[in-house]
């Protein structure tokens, strides 16, 4: 399975749209930063045909330290979640 990096994504954008490489990388950075900022604010992001990003609450629970076996309390936290769209599934 191939991994797509930001550099590869910006190269693809540069090759197919005709953007200069630096502008394409800047566009990819702006896109990812806007998604991250929106998720941090608790907003849901939906990109039609691709998928959606949202924040979900993970409830508090009891965990276990694997080294000592001692029980540990794990606090509630918010985690990002991605759900793929129909076209990707």
Image: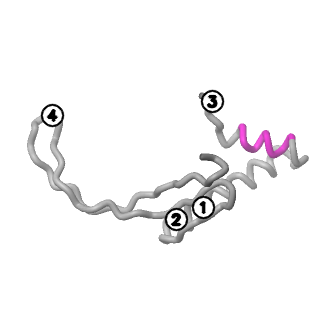
How crowded pointer 4 is (Cα within 10 Å; few <14, some 14-19, many 20+) is rated as few
Q: Is the C-beta separation of discs 4 and 3 under 8 Å?
A: no
Residue 73: image x %, image y %? Answer: 16, 55
Query: What residue is disc 4 on?
Result: 67
Find residue 35 and name its label. 1
Residue 52: image x %, image y %? Answer: 57, 60
Drawn side of residue 35 relative to residue 59, left or right = right
Residue at coordinates 54% horizontally, 68% vertically from top-left? Answer: 44
Query: What residue is disc 3 on?
Result: 2
Drawn side of residue 12 relative to residue 52, left or right = right
Reply above or below: 55 against 32. Answer: below
Mark 1–mark 3 distance (CA, rounded to whole Å): 23 Å
Mark 4–mark 2 distance (CA, rounded to whole Å): 34 Å
Secondary structure beneath label 2: helix
Reply above or below: 87 against 68. Answer: below
* Magenta span dominant secondary structure: helix
């Amino acid at each position: 399975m191939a991994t797509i990096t930001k550099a590869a994504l910006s190269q693809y954008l540069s090759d197919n749209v005709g953007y200069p490489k630096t502008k394409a990388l800047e566009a990819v950075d702006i896109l990812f930063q806007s998604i991250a900022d929106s998720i941090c604010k608790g907003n849901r992001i939906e990109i039609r045909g691709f998928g959606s990003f949202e924040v979900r609450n993970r409830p508090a629970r009891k965990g276990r330290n694997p080294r000592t076996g001692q029980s540990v309390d794990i606090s509630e936290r918010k985690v990002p979640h991605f759900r793929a769209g129909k076209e990707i599934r």
